[in-house]
Structure formats: structure tokens, C-alpha cells
Image (tube, helix red, strand yellow):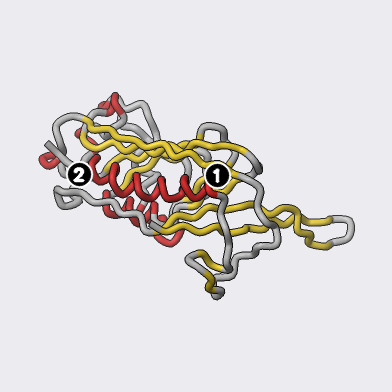
């Protein structure tokens, strides 16, 4: 239920003059306070797949708790399971992410999610898919890869949400200052209404749809 916009500067090196020059400034949409709840006590890991359709930007999970996302154990499928999909990305500035996480950890990873765009006046869809249960052919983990085989749900339950992000022109003089207070955004920053709808839609739908994903039986 919170959102903020952060300007992030990129630098390039002028080799001839040995000077560091500011090259570009990208916009970062940051989401906070995402709730993920599971009714069966957070027993089993879920598979999370996040993607963008036009690759105009990059996604990053909450870097402060990035260790809660497992990008390793699903990277090498066991031949006996028949699983064909693999982990993807590392949680920082990725076009696509596939990882494992406990449901409550997923909430922490998404609270602090950042989308950084590289092209102004463009449209981007961010899709988040969550697979709960067993069934490697449907996107879930095979039973052999669940640490608590006796607790997994019967079958693979899949839910997803797509969030539309409209990236419009912004004021280059608006610099992020966490100490400034004016309204509910830092430094009196203002977001285009399209981005506002996308940001709040993302937080709200994650809190509701992701929660319903974990209702078992």
C-alpha cells in the first residue's frame, strides 16, 4: 500500500580526459508494504515467475532480503523428476525471474520490489505467476523436490496477475531526498496518474490474489 519514485543516475567514464561524467538518469518505481499470507502455516515453497513483455525495463527484488529467494536449487533439474524449467535471474535488474521462496518470504521480497525503466513514454506489462503444489509439467515443483512431501497440496495451483506500467515524462529536477516531507511521497515528488494506478494496482492485487493462491483444498 505504499509507492515511491526514485531517480537513479548512471555514470560513464571519459577515458580521454579521465573524468567521470553523468550520462543518464533512469526512473525507478518502488513498491512497499506487500502482504503475502498462507493459511497452512507457510509449510511449502512456491515457484515464482516474474516477467516483462517488452523488456523496456528491469526488475529487482528487495535487495536487503535477497537471500530469501532461492535461485540455485531449481537451476539443475534432477533427471528422474522430468522437470524442464530452471531458475532464471538473480533478483537484481532482470527482465525475467524464476525462483523459489516460502510464502511469507515472498512478501518480504516483493516489499521493496523495484522496476527501472530505460525508455520514456512507453508501456510495459509486468506479470507475476505463482505455482503452489506439485506438478513439474504445470510449473510447480516435482514431489521429489519438496522437502515436506506429506504436506503439499494435491495438484498444481497456479495464479497470476499482470500489472500495466505506463512510463511518462518526468521532471529531471525532482531528486529523491528521503529527509524531505511534503504529502505522502518524499521530496514532494509527483507520479503520473497512470503510474499511480499501476503501482497501487500492483500492491493491492498482490495482497489479495497472492493470498488466495495459497488457500488449499
Residue 174: quarter of image: bottom right
Residue at the spot x=42%, y=50% of the render?
200
In this view of the protein, which residue sits in the foreground, 58 or 70? 58
Residue at the spot x=24%, y=28% of the render?
135
Check disc 1 and report the residue beneath it: 58
SS for callout 2: loop
Residue 175: quarter of image: bottom right
Position of the C terminus by quadrant? top left
Q: Position of residue 164 (x, y in %)?
A: 48, 39
Check disc 2 and report the residue beneath it: 147
Q: Position of residue 118 (x, y in %)?
A: 64, 44
Position of the N terminus by quadrant? bottom left
Whether pointer 1 and pointer 2 mark residues with C-beta atoms closer than 8 Å, the reply is: no
**Which residue reaches farthest right?**
16
**With respect to residue 61, does 137 lie above or below?**
above
Residue at the spot x=20%, y=49% of the render?
38
Amino acid at each position: 500500500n505504499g509507492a515511491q519514485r526514485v531517480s537513479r543516475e548512471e555514470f560513464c567514464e571519459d577515458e580521454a580526459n579521465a573524468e567521470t561524467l553523468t550520462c543518464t538518469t533512469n526512473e525507478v518505481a518502488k513498491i512497499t508494504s506487500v502482504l503475502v499470507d498462507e493459511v497452512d502455516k507457510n509449510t511449502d515453497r512456491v515457484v515464482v515467475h516474474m516477467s516483462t513483455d517488452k523488456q523496456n525495463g528491469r526488475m529487482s527484488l528487495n535487495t536487503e532480503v535477497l537471500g530469501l529467494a532461492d535461485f540455485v536449487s531449481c537451476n539443475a533439474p534432477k533427471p528422474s523428476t522430468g522437470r524442464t524449467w530452471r531458475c532464471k535471474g538473480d533478483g537484481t535488474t532482470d527482465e525475467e525471474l524464476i525462483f523459489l521462496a516460502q510464502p511469507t518470504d515472498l512478501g518480504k521480497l516483493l516489499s521493496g520490489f523495484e522496476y527501472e525503466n530505460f525508455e520514456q513514454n512507453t508501456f510495459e506489462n509486468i506479470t507475476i505467476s505463482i505455482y503452489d503444489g506439485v506438478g513439474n509439467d504445470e510449473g510447480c515443483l516435482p514431489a521429489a523436490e519438496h522437502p515436506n512431501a506429506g504436506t503439499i497440496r494435491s495438484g498444481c495451483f497456479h495464479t497470476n496477475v499482470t500489472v500495466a506500467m505506463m512510463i511518462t515524462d518526468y521532471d529531471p529536477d525532482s531528486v529523491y531526498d528521503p529527509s524531505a516531507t511534503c504529502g505522502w511521497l518524499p521530496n514532494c515528488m509527483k507520479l503520473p496518474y497512470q503510474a499511480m494506478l499501476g503501482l497501487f494496482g500492483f500492491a493491492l492485487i498482490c495482497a489479495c490474489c497472492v493470498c488466495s493462491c495459497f488457500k488449499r483444498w
